[in-house]
Amino acid sequence: MYKRKVQQTGGGTLFVTLPKGWAAQLGVSHGAELNLVPSEGGPLLIVPPGLRERNRCQLPLDDRSKEELERDIIAHYIAGFDVIQVAGDRVRPQQRRMVREIAQSLIGMEILEETQSTVTLHSVVNLQDFPAQQTLHRIFSITQAMLADAVSAFLTQEEELARDVIERDGDVDRLVLLVARQFSLLLRDLVTEQEVGLSRLEFLYQHTVADQLERVADHAVKISRAALETPAPLARGVRERVQGLAAESGEVLAGAMRAFETRNSKLANQVLGRKEDRQRLLELAQLSAADQPENAYAISIVMDSLLRSREYGFNIAEIALDAAVASPPPSAPSG
């Protein structure tokens, strides 16, 4: 931290000097134009010219597997880097395809330039084009449909529907990664907070809810995989118990999301009041698996996933309570 005394010119203008080392490091010299950004709570942010253009990194290609390179690129994408260059002695065609496939899994990440030794990715995402509230509502809509369709695929043993649910998980993952990137940018750059019109605290709630919904989507995938591996038709009693637990989990999730989006603490408490039914539902899940031993493994997976999805709904309701106290309701999501 630097400390400076406020001084005053003869005309009454107030001014402070800039630290010499900081100015030299960022190339700020006489005549440079700085942006001064007031932020919530009172601090004034000084932004030197060209600061954002330096937001780039280089990753070694070497002989890394696609999984390892993908994790590295995603980590830098989430961290908020705008330009990610993958470099090696010579980039083989197979490696170029690998980098392209990774880029296609990230919203707004495009190939900017290719040479014999590099592939440069550039993020073209404009945060204003992806308002956090609308993105979160979209994540919920996809997740809600995935869970319902996964249960339907399990009950009817419809292979095509089960595989469709599994494919849709990629859509949720891309949107959740985008929210994570936006949150990271807000933490690093107060200017971004001004641009998106949300405080970092509010965005923390959005990011945390998105993470809970991603887990629900993962359980929808588990239910769909169980549907593909169920050896025998389901008994009537099992079907009814699965349908009942699916309806319960869906209602908890929907109620929790309404409470969060509207900052309705009364509704959030109503949702949380349903927690006491857990033991009864757990006993039903165990009974369903015991009723049909040939399908016991698949039934256990489905009932466990539905119970866990219900718990994630309760987590969202808890977040709704925190958000209702700390921040006013954001603009209503569209779509």
Image (cartoon, helix red, strand yellow):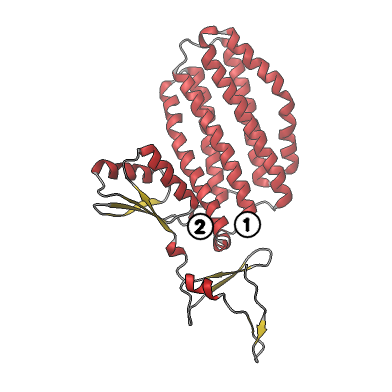
Q: Report whether 33 appears left or right of 116.
A: right
* Amino acid type, residue under disc 1 in the picture: Ser
Which of marks 2 and 1 precedes in the sequence? 2
Name the residue carrying label 1. Answer: 199
Marks 1,2: beta carbons within 8 A? no
Q: Report whether 146 appears left or right of 274.
A: left
Residue 241 horizontal/vertical position (percent) = 61, 16
The foreground one among 175 and 184 is 184
Q: Residue at the location (55% across, 21% down)?
A: 302
Name the residue carrying label 2. Answer: 128
Q: Residue at the location (70% across, 39% down)?
A: 318
Circle number at residue 63: none
Q: Secondary structure at mark 2?
A: helix
Up the image or down, 108 lies above or below 279; here it is below
Q: Residue at the location (65% across, 67% down)?
A: 43
Residue at the extreme bottom of the image, as rendered: 10
Snapshot quadrant of residue 256: top right
Residue 331 horizontal/vertical position (percent) = 62, 53
Q: Is residue 144 visible?
A: no
Q: How many marks?
A: 2
Snapshot quadrant of residue 252: top right
Q: Quadrant of the C terminus?
A: top right
Q: Residues within 10 Å of mark 2 (few under 14, many from 20)?
A: few
Per the model, the C-alpha gap separating discs 1 and 2 is 14 Å
Q: Is residue 278 visible?
A: yes
* Amino acid type, residue under disc 2 in the picture: Gln
Q: Quadrant of the N terminus?
A: bottom right
Residue 240 horizontal/vertical position (percent) = 60, 16
Q: Residue at the location (75% across, 37% down)?
A: 269
Q: Secondary structure at mark 1?
A: loop
